Amino acid sequence: MAQSTLNSMREASTGTLVVKNHLNFWGGKRVKPRQEANAEPVFEPATGRVLCQMYPCGAEEVDEAIKSAHSAYLKWSKLAGMERARVMLEAARIIRERRENIAKLEVINNGKSISEALVDIDVSWQTIEYYAGLAGALAGQHIQLPGGAFAYTRREPLGVCAGIGAWNYPFQIATWKSAPALACGNALVFKPSPMTPVTAVILAEIYKEAGVPDGLFNVVQGGAETGSLLCHHPMVAKVTFTGSVPTGKKVMEMSAKTVKQVTLELGGKSPLIIFKDCEFENAVKGALMANFLTQGQVCCNGTRVFVQRDIMPQFIEEVVRRTKAIPIGDPLLETTRMGALISKPQLEKVLGYVKEAKKQGARVLCGGEPYVPSDPTLKGGYFMSPCILDNCTDDMTCVKEEIFGPVMSILPFDTEEEVIRRANNTTFGLASGVFTRDITRAHRVAENLEAGTCFINNYNISPVEVPFGGYKMSGFGRENGQVTLEYFSQLKTVIVEMGDVESVF
Ligand SMILES: NC(=O)c1ccc[n+]([C@@H]2O[C@H](COP(=O)([O-])OP(=O)(O)OC[C@H]3O[C@@H](n4cnc5c(N)ncnc54)[C@H](O)[C@@H]3O)[C@@H](O)[C@H]2O)c1
Ligand SMILES: C[N+](C)(C)CCCC=O
């Protein structure tokens, strides 16, 4: 089934695909929506055309998906780690084999360029492969106690977990959540963003084809209401959420009612600090990587670019020159480097931020305008030209708020002490970056920045082996890396007496 859906992608081009298959998945198969009344159109960002309809799941459907997950969990959790690993490795292999077609479908639904989507799909199978490798290594401790008694700990799964995803990395988010969850012996019910419903169900089909029990990875479609049903459900042990800060707060509040564990991967307004002793060419490339991937719709983007005053003129000249040269257009073309934003409202919101920045005194050095590609198919797409703002100050809205679009704000600084204070002056704390040739300074700055990640002399790379997550209001818990196993498992202590019970009674 997965293969036949994906096979149709070979011929698909921008503006041609219509998705008609059911997008819910539980009990090991696609499930017809129960009610078609609340259908929401899903758009192809590059054309503005309707790609499919999304039918939100109601309480009965969510309950069915969770019960299906629970019965799969009872079987899956009894397998040895190595047995789970074998199935997961097969899923990773299938994704790798079908990477082009999955990436194409992702592009059509999300609007990002195919060159980026291919990387996202590669990161996805690597994530599953990585956690498959760790599944067999899950282990407890043995603790010797007096009189021959001893204790041991068991690392056990949590049960049924719920995943709620954002729209910027639809397939990758589903794998970042499912791979560690499944490796630890859990089942997952995943709700993608209502704007990007089409690729999570492909992942569900691939897991099934690889041999997971029916119900182990399920997809329920919907928006806030469906998400809140997951957060309230008594059979859900944990919610792993990726999205905005306001929604994250609600997820935490709802989950508290039944004391569910929560992981929150939220937004950011990350600082990127460029010292005058940097390797200049790399710093400019780093600033572009920090701002313009996925049309700037990246949680960890370094959108506050602090540049040491001495190199400001050269930096501006070069970063603007390169930004103006970014090829915008049909995201399925290999030469395109910037596709379309996710939706018309998102495009308008981002353009609104640029307008507001100008009103507050920022200067637009390039971009910040709607962009209409010459290809007539793309006339209704949600494109804009990547924007660089200077003359910015720390109190401007464009410098304080997460824009989630291709808008870089440049801020001059003089000293290290000053820039660290200003970089930390935010409620967010997802990521940060520093470019310098001074190794001592690099580590000192990394230590002092209040963020879950600090990139030194690069930006926005995320190897699956390293933990990713926020400080402050950017959330808590981690994805990727070994540590994430701790967020998808719980520790049981078993105490064993080898002698007689010494009773005080
Ligand atoms: N830290 C990370 O790893 C990371 C990654 C990607 C995106 N993000 C953040 O996500 C945001 C953009 O994504 P978005 O617009 O999809 O975010 P969002 O908060 O609007 O939605 C995220 C998800 O939550 C669901 N949702 C909305 N209301 C809900 C409710 N009341 N209960 C339960 N679920 C609910 C949505 O349907 C969607 O699936 C940005 O702030 C970005 O920084 C963070
Ligand atoms: C893969 N990146 C670029 C590090 C993005 C991770 C997910 C954030 O939105």
Image (cartoon, rainbow, N blue to C red):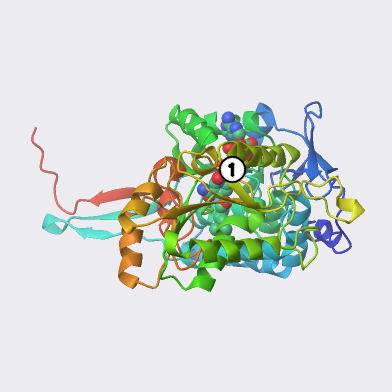
The residue where tag 1 is placed is 403
Task: Give coordinates of residue 281: x percent, y percent.
Answer: 54, 72
Ligand 1 image position (quadrant): top right
Q: Quadrant of the N terminus?
A: bottom right
Residue 164 horizontal/vertical position (percent) = 59, 41
- 24 relative to 16, above or below: above
The image shows residue 87, relative to residue 233, as above or below, that is below
Query: Is 496 placed left or right of 318 in the picture?
Result: left
Q: Is residue 389 left or right of residue 107?
A: left
Give the residue displayed 84% in from the left and 48% down from the top.
Answer: 47
**Camera-side residue: 329 or 331?**
329
Q: Left of 89 or right of it: where is 414?
A: left
Q: Nearer the viewer, residue 475 or 275?
A: 275
- Mark yes or no: residue 83 visible: no
Determine if residue 306 is in view. Answer: yes
Name the quadrant containing residue 242: top right
Of residues 213 and 7, the one nearer the viewer is 7
Residue 399 location in percent, x, y? Answer: 51, 43
- Residue at the spot 46% in from the left edge and 49% down from the top edge: 430
Task: Residue lying at the far left in this picture: please name it.
Answer: 504
User: How far across and how far down the image is residue 250, in percent?
Assistant: 51, 30
Amino acid type at circle 1 is: Ile
Quarter of the image where one finds residue 444: bottom left
Q: Residues within 10 Å of mark 1 (few under 14, many from 20)?
A: many
Q: Which part of the image, by quadrant, shows the C terminus?
A: top left
Please, what secondary structure does the residue beneath circle 1 have? loop
